[in-house]
Image (cartoon, grey):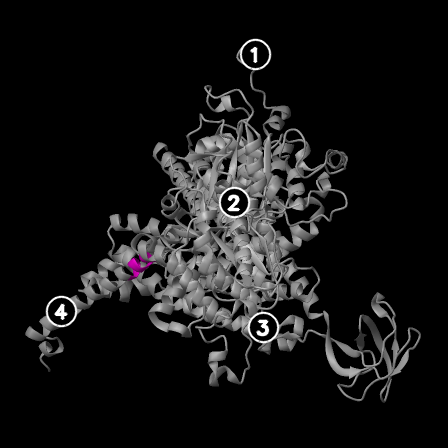
Amino acid sequence: MENPENLYPVDEELQKFIDYRKRSGTIWRGVFLMSLFVAILVLIVLMLNIINDAFGLVALENEVDPHSLVTGYQENTMVSMPNTFASTNHAALAAVIQQNETGIGFVGHAHYQTNADDLRLIAVDGQFPTAETVADGSYPFARPLYIYTALDTLQSEPAVAGYFRFYLENANNSGGELGYFLADETLMADQINLIDTLAGGPQALDSLGGNLALSGSSSLYPLSRQMLLDFRQAGFGGDISIEQIGSEAGIEAFCRGDIQVLNASRPMTVAEAATCQRNRVNPVEIAVGLDALAIVSHPSLDFLESVSLKEMGQIFAAMNYWDEIDPSYPVEPIVRAVPGEGSGSLELLSGSMFSTIGLENLSGAAYAEIIRENLGRGRGRALERDQRFLAEGFIFDSQTAFNGACASAEPPTGCAQPARDRDNLLDLIEQEIIVPQIQQTWPLYDSIFNRQAIVAEASRKYPDAIVEFKSWLNPDFLVNPQSSEAELAGVRTAIWGTVMVVATTFLFSFPVGVGAAIYLEEYADSTKWYNKIIQTNISNLAGVPSIIYGMLGLTVFVRLLLPLTSGEMFGRVAEGTDPSGRTVISAGLTLGLLILPIIIINAQEALRAVPNSMRRAGMGLGATKWQTTWSHVLPAALPGILTGTILAMSRAVGETAPLIVVGASTVIRTDPTFFSRFTVLPIQIFQWTSRPQPEFQNLAAAAIIVLLLILLTLNASAVILRNRYSTSS
Amino acid sequence: MINSPVHDIDLTEDVALSLRKKTKWHETLIQGALVACGILSVFTTIGIVVILLNESISFFTREVFEITNKSIATDIGPADTTFETTASGSTLVVGQIVRVDDELMEVLAVDGLSLTVERGIQGTEVSFHTADEEIEKSVRVPFREVFTGSRWQPRLQQFGMWPLILSTLMISVISMIVALPLGLASAIYLSEYASNRTRSIVKPILEVLAGIPTVVYGYFALTFMTPFLERAFFGDNIQVFNTLSAGIVVGVLIIPLVSSMSEDALHAVPQSLRNASYGLGATKLETALRVVLPAALSGVTAAFVVAISRAIGETMVVAVAAGAGPRNFEWSQVFTNYGETPLNPLQSAETMTGHIVRISGGDLSYNSIDYNSIFAIGLVLFLITLTLNIISRRIVERFREVYD
């Protein structure tokens, strides 16, 4: 017989074996714990990911600069004030001021120089236009002047190239006498080189063929004219002509190819240059000098020494009599002379004069005016029918057409509603005219830790954009309806949709589910085959993929029960429109069927937990089965039933797939009714997530936070309910 | 009543009658209503089955028109019933329905290249046709192709469901690789190792994870998991929409289901078994893996099966992250060039559920081939998940170890 000791490890070997078992125990325990942590880690990462996307820096670019709306409005006001004379011709402006004893106005500094005896120069914020104040920018109404020609013209017509070179060489000599401010000498030399590169070297003036025709700005007129005359004096033999039509009209005509050489008192905008390029006019821009706009008055207005920008705003765009500005001034009407619309001077003037006024400072009437000026007629009329802009009168619509629409079978909403208030108009300007557009977004982490790099990148890629920190989850996001502009989109309609769909679900599935549970627990004989079938069936239904319920809903509620779910039965479908079953009711009922098994199973458990003694007590007192159930069993089981129901509801709130199949819409701008098409939060999230533009991912993240908060509220109330009743009983 | 005169109780028939249980009509009515509530759930199932079957039958019996490469040889007027066809293309047989432009005709006789037809059947309009117009012939959706074919494009008469089935299986396999080990290990830790305090903290977290809507997981897969996989492992090889990321995230969302069902099963194993194991000198690990787990095997297996069923039916994650458009392939390439089949997890592919969502997402017109086809897919989906759920319940019932 063998020694039994050999069967088992002994001494060192035993110790080793025990150590091995201990070690593997520890290692595996670690592995199990890690697995658990993975789940928790995922939850943390998921939440962080959402928060990371829901906040962060954005680069925002407006389609229309809000400030240009303000200046545009103020310009119009200024030009249409009483006793105001507007012209693109500065000589005419100077004449008006000379002739009126209470006249004040703007003329180019060159024009002031020629009429210096009859005009009185007024300082702006204590600064007179001088070479220094203009050069260092402390005098606000100064700007460079330009002449333009097309590259083709420059190269094919030697007269133009010769004139340009002559202009650059001599402008600084005669410009000073004419009241212009001199341009930088090196700049002029550089530009001469440019002309030589583009058009070849200098040629003798008397050999230049062809004619010269200038047009455009009135501010540059005196200088260009002088240059033309000097040019002829120097030997040019062709015909010369010059007109003054204002910079804007000039640029327009130039870009059509109608003007040979253009005078402009402002540089071309990017948009104007693009128009030129489209017309195959390739503009060559040459700066020829600086001009200042002088504010001048009739010599008799000697009480005005210096004015501030704000006072100028009052003088030119608000008041009618001098004493309204200061009681010590005479009671005389203000007679104004301002540069006409479409001139570079007016732009320069209003850009500085109204720079202190923000869009939010304007009145409701001003907003209505801005809308009139900037909104398309068709869109404006549609908006006006939704809700009127003015309490009295119309901007786009006519009284008769509006009355006609109101008398029709389907009156627009504007008939019954009061006119839009100031805030509403401001919102409208923002949404329809300014249309802020997000160029790029950055997640929260980068926004905090790489802020500088982001700002630098943004200013390089989007020079016109503002970079600001944006919380995608904000009050506007909650109250705005769906929109195709990420900046303006919100979840109001989706939240309403969710609330109404879930309300329908509750009204349907709670009574039915609890009823079924009561039947199965209190009445049914669970040994009978048919009750077994019901029970098995309910647990099988709980395992059916939710999308199958969507198909059930699509066939039964959307198609078969169309008259009911579209509201046709209740007269809720407008005549002439096709009834659609893709409504809140259909969605609610579909989700009702989906969560019915969950409610039944939970309610059954709650009923099962009620002790039998309660039933017997009820029965013993002679109560019927229903009386016992209603007044004893149900109240005892109610907390459990409600907890289960709330959990089932939170499942319904988050369901997406069946609603897509039932036909949730994605673009719903008006609040839903029970018989209207609908969208819900998860659908909105799905739609935004599926869009390629990154800003919609941010919107989706914000919507997810809203959805999770709703679910958290529901679940927390379920927990509170459970705790309150479990302690009291 | 207190002040009523006291009678001697006289056991006459009247009294006996009044003591008998009375049938109250409103009690019956209430009970009827409750029964109806119970039966509604049965009707739901019946409804699902009937609707899926019904629409699937319309799918399989639907006429679709196939290009024959044959066309009319001469112009035919509205009154002509016999005309010549070109020699090319497939041959037509008597009784076949053909379509020329929008008009349907039934072939009455074939004589060489000449066809005799009945014009304008099924209410279509008889019209003039010029030579060279295509003749299309009607075919039924081929039953065999649906379950063997490898291309799914119903509008182009390609009805092989395998691209959808294969990508569904792919997602399920990936998700199971994630969910089963993690879920089971978590369950073992929670049931065998964790203190009550740990459990009271961790279980609610798992419940939160289980309660997050699946569309949120879809967002997570697209905006976190895919970029993460791209940066950490695959670089440019991984597409923006891919089955790997969707599969992993589906796995994550199933972890709570697996772990809670498995933990219930492990927890139900009586303490006496563990004590006996410890008494024999087993360590905690040995007890957990060799005693408790085998004892709870039926419950754990059931959890696995339910998890598979859940993964197959999962919709939103795959709709968001796995891609749009079925990945059609050739059977001959499945093993030689699997990178072009749905078996490549780095490429986009569309599952059955994803396809249903995408097709029904637009304004789907009823009675189109697409509309019918999603019900056929739904039927397959329903049958798979139902079978899995029934199997899971059978496992629990049949293999349950009963300890007293």
Residue A213 relative to residue A329: left or right: right
Towards the viewer: B388 or B273 = B388
Q: Which residues are magenta?
A: A35-44
Q: Are marks 3 and 1 on the same chain?
A: yes
Q: Which chain does the numbered disc 1 sit on?
A: B
Disc 3 residue type (three-letter): Met
Q: Which residue type carries mark 4?
A: Ile
The span from disc 1 to disc 2 (Cα, nearest Å) is 111 Å
Say whether mark 3 and mark 4 are on the same chain: no
- Residue at numbered disc 4: A18
Percent coordinates x, y for residue A438 in the rendering: 47, 53
State whether residue A307 is above or below residue B319. Answer: above
CA distance for labels 1 and 4: 88 Å
Badge 4 marks a residue whose secondary structure is: helix
Q: What label sits on residue A345 in the rendered view? A: 2
Q: Nearer the viewer, residue B78 or A123?
A: A123
In primary-sequence order, the first of circles 3 and 1 is 1
- Amino acid type of disc 1? Ser
- Mark 3 sits on what residue? B161
Asked if the stretch drawn in magenta spans residue A257, the answer is no
Residue B106 place in picture, x, y as percent: 84, 75
The residue identified by callout 1 is: B4
Q: Are marks 2 and 4 in contact (CB under 8 Å)?
A: no
Specify the principal SS of the magenta part: helix
Residue A701 position in % (x across, y down) = 43, 52
Say whether marks 2 and 3 touch (CB < 8 Å). Answer: no
**Mark 2 residue type:** Ser
Left or right: where does residue A372 sit relative to residue B276? right
Residue A66 vs A701, above or below: the answer is above
Q: Are marks 3 and 1 in contact (CB under 8 Å)?
A: no
Distance in Å between CA atoms under marks 2 and 3? 72 Å
